[in-house]
Image (spheres, rainbow, N blue to C red):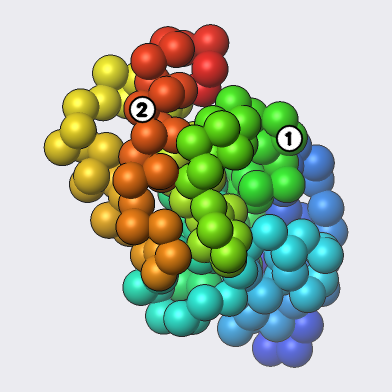
Amino acid sequence: MRSCTGKCFLELEVNGRTVSVAAKPSDTLLHVLREKLGLTGAKPGCENGDCGACTVLVDGMPVKSCLMLAAEAVGHAVTTVEGLKDAPIQTAFVEQWGFQCGYCTSGFLMVCHALALHHPDADDALIETWLQSNLCRCTGYAEIRAAVKSILADGPRRA
């Protein structure tokens, strides 16, 4: 994106598709995903990077989209929870009751999916480290841990 003062057109790769979207230089990735592209899986929680409800993957790594400008995503692959399609982590969350109210679920799904992809042999300590990036006020985390462990136990085919 070249320097601009009003609205600029950004070309973003989101969930495997290239999209062009008008955005202000100050628009966060979260705002563009939700308000411009209709991808509402990432949730506006705290909007200061503490809760993780807005987590998406950028080049396969978890990023809090409320802290990233949309312009910073140009040239990078963005994956939202909508782009996970039928990823095994989603089934594991259902099977292990890894959600209650559901508000934080998409952020946790993104973190757990990335963890399984990048660290298929993760131990309890590494799982805890990755889960610390997101907050849940309903589940108590036991079910979320169980969901992660179930896909890690099933090996690489489940990531």
What is the count of numbered marks? 2
Disc 1 designates what residue?
A: 85
Q: Secondary structure at mark 2?
A: helix
Residue behind mark 2: 149
- Alpha-carbon distance for marks 1 and 2? 20 Å
Q: With respect to residue 4, does 70 lie above or below?
A: above
Residue 18 visible in the snapshot: yes
Q: What amino acid is at disc 2?
A: Lys
Q: Residue at x 82, y 65 (%)?
A: 38
Question: Residue 142, how many percent across, how many down?
Answer: 33, 46
User: Is residue 115 visible to us here?
Assistant: no
Residue under the point 36% across and 27% down: 149
Residue situated furthest left in the rendering: 125
Q: Is residue 33 above or below residue 85?
A: below
Look at discs 1 and 2 and give the one toward the viewer: 2
Residue drawn at x 53%, y 17% as measured from the top left:
158
Q: Are marks 1 and 2 in contact (CB under 8 Å)?
A: no
Say if 82 sits above or below 48 in the image.
above
Rendered location of residue 56, percent (x, y): 55, 53
Expressed as whole percent of the image width and height from the top left, the position of residue 51 reads 40, 70
